[in-house]
Amino acid sequence: MNTADQYLKTIYVVQDSEDGPASTGSIADSLGVSPASANEMIGKLEERGLAEHEKYKGVTLTDDGIVRARDALQTYCIIERFLANVLAVEDFQAEARELEAVIDDTVAERLDTIIDRQPECPDCFDPESDACACLEIAPEPVEPEQQ
């Protein structure tokens, strides 16, 4: 399941790595969805004022979209660090991707008190490894999910 926040997070990371608008293909690949599915959600994000899509150029987040994306990325890092560093879950990245859609702000804040989040979060996220750089264990290489 890919929620709006997961799309925002992905667009934010892809936009940063591509140093400009995020291509629909890159977004779809990162999320393991079809370009048509990505376009559909991008349209919804545009309607909500969170993203702007220019055909053949890509997607950029609005200021509100950036705020939501950074919040989503921070929540993901909190979940990932809790699963890896506190619970020692072996496949913490897959679990974090599943949980990020259902963990609300209250739970994330409580988990945050346990993991002692670093001040650089969410800038600690490393797109190369698809993981928080503050993990105490090395993440496994991750392949995008396929639909």
Image (cartoon, rainbow, N blue to C red):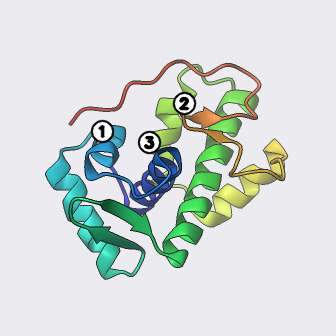
Look at the picture and state if 5 lies above or below 78.
below
- Could you say which disc has been placed on residue 29 in the image? 1
Q: How many marks?
A: 3
Placement of 122 over or under 84, stated as above or below: below
* Mark 1 Cα-neighbour bin, 10 Å: few <14, some 14–19, many ≥20: some
Which residue sits at x=35%, y=73%?
Answer: 52
Q: Position of residue 88 (x, y in %)?
A: 68, 23
Write down the quadrant of residue 104 in the picture: bottom right
Q: In terms of image quadrants, where is residue 115?
A: top right
Residue under pointer 2: 128
User: What amino acid is found at the position of numbered circle 2 in the picture?
Assistant: Glu
**Which badge, 2 or 3, is on the more N-terminal residue?**
3
As rendered, which of 65 and 139 lies closer to the eye?
Answer: 65
Left or right: 62 in relation to 88: left
Label 2: element kind: loop
Q: Residue 43: which quarter of the image?
A: bottom left
Closer to the N terminus: mark 1 or mark 2?
Answer: 1
Residue 27 position in % (x across, y down): 33, 48
- The residues bearing labels 2 and 3 have C-alpha atoms spaced at a distance of 20 Å
Write down the residue under mark 3. 98
10 Å crowding of disc 3: few (<14), some (14-19), many (20+)? few
Residue type, mark 1 in image = Asp
